Image: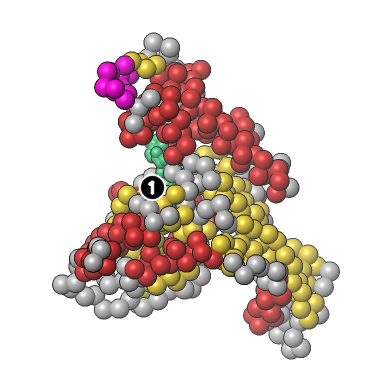
Amino acid sequence: MEEIVFALDIGTTKICALVGEVREGQLQIIGLGIQPARGMRKGMVVDVGEASVALAKAVEAAEQTSGYHLSEAFISMAGEHISSTNNRGAVAVGRHDTGVSSDDIARALDAAQAIPIPHNRQLVHLIPRSYTIDDQEGVRSPIGMHGFRLEVEAHIVTAASSALRNLSTCADNVGIRTNEFVLNAVASAEAVLEPNEREMGVIVADIGGGTTDLALYMQGSVWHTHVIPVGGYHITNDIAIGLRAPYEVAEQVKIRYGDCRPQEIDGDNVFTVEPFGGEKIQVGRQDLAYVIEARVEEMFQLILQEIQRSGYDGMLPAGIVLTGGTAQLRGITQVAERVLNVPARVALPRNLVGLVDSLQSPAYATGIGLLRWAMSGQQLYRPRLPQTGLWGRRVGNLLKALLPG
Ligand SMILES: Nc1ncnc2c1ncn2[C@@H]1O[C@H](COP(=O)(O)OP(=O)(O)OP(=O)(O)O)[C@@H](O)[C@H]1O
Ligand SMILES: [Mg+2]
């Protein structure tokens, strides 16, 4: 029997709606809708109406390609409002011969969750890092082990309630209930990390349009997370200012000619652009690369600062894994390696099956990872029966609702 999972990656620049079919533990992509995002800034909704219209189009495309009526989704989240901490919780192990039970683990996690959370924030993730049974530290899977005292160390992620509500309101507007929110980088990691990388120590940096999302893994689990409100948008903006050209022109220039290794580019290598005012000018690719390099270097400095702040500097032998659209920038791994002094690689989603041609990009790691997260969490749900003849109702109703009078 197959199960259907639905993921919505609502990014700053694009929305990616993916439908996955899970059969015997294998994921197949059976529906997708990719749309430019609207009403978003630095990973957060700033205009619910605009964001909902864009979302409606993506959801409709995903329904049309998959043939399913979709009613709930796993949704990615990002933004500066997200913060994380670690906490411990300990309980006495219940008295039975079978050792630690799932009930003991649930009580320990409950205890770990007892941190003061301001009323305007809410808990999003409570991820066990490791367990201690009596004096035995570093236990991965305590079920069935014997002891008197069970302690869990958990990574806790909280977010501003208003930011989450804005996201789920957009989903509600298009008839989708929020199944779970998942931090961008945690979702991306699900799509790209090898088990041995998680084991040894690795950091995933999802560098999107408006945010750089970090998730640090050690001993097989999430150890630290952070969101930096800088992304590809800022690189394009620097280029636009440098060229005195519109943002769209700068974006094209970045993608066609951009590189972050000015030393490796011939000084005679030029291209033509049309800045404001209309008179075409010639620009050196090396000069462009200097502008890009400066911003990208700054982005990795911010990542380095966060790694140092987390206290795991020097403990990431598997290095940094880059995802997000900006990871496609030429030469980005060299800058990462120079600044962080660890190996760097750009990652595409792994082991894709189904409608995958347009998903072969690091920009889709979050969407694919959401589906994998949904699978691993056993949060699968039964689809409603496919419906026909209703396509278009969402955008239509929504636009009606948004029009004045
Ligand atoms: N070939 C490329 N070279 C450099 N940058 C690129 C390339 N293709 C896309 N980008 C950049 O990637 C960014 C979009 O990445 P992505 O799709 O991961 O963002 P997002 O998920 O919408 O945003 P976020 O996750 O920050 O909310 C844009 O800034 C875009 O300019
Ligand atoms: Mg993204």
Location of the N terminus (image quadrant): bottom left
Q: Residues within 10 Å of mark 1 (few under 14, many from 20)?
A: many
Say if the magenta span includes residue 343: no
**Quadrant of the image occupied by residue 113:** bottom right
Q: Horizontally, is 187 left or right of 397 in the view?
A: right
Is the magenta region chiefly helix, strand or loop?
loop
Ligand 1 near label 1 (Cβ, under 8 Å)?
Answer: yes
State which quadrant residue 137 falls in. bottom right
Determine the secondary structure under disc 1: loop
Callout count: 1
Where residue 227 sits in the image (x, y, percent)?
A: 57, 50
User: Looking at the image, which residue is at 40% across and 19% down?
Assistant: 285
**Lateral position of residue 405 relative to residue 352, left or right:** left
- Residue 59 position in % (x across, y down): 30, 63
**Magenta span:** 271-281
Q: Amino acid at mark 1?
A: Thr
Q: Check the picture and name the quadrant holding the C terminus.
A: bottom left
The residue beneath circle 1 is: 13
Q: Residue at x 44, y 63 (%)?
A: 166
Q: How is the image coloured?
A: secondary structure
Which percent across, then down, holds residue 142? 70, 73
Q: Is residue 199 left or right of residue 278?
A: right
Quarter of the image holding residue 56?
bottom left
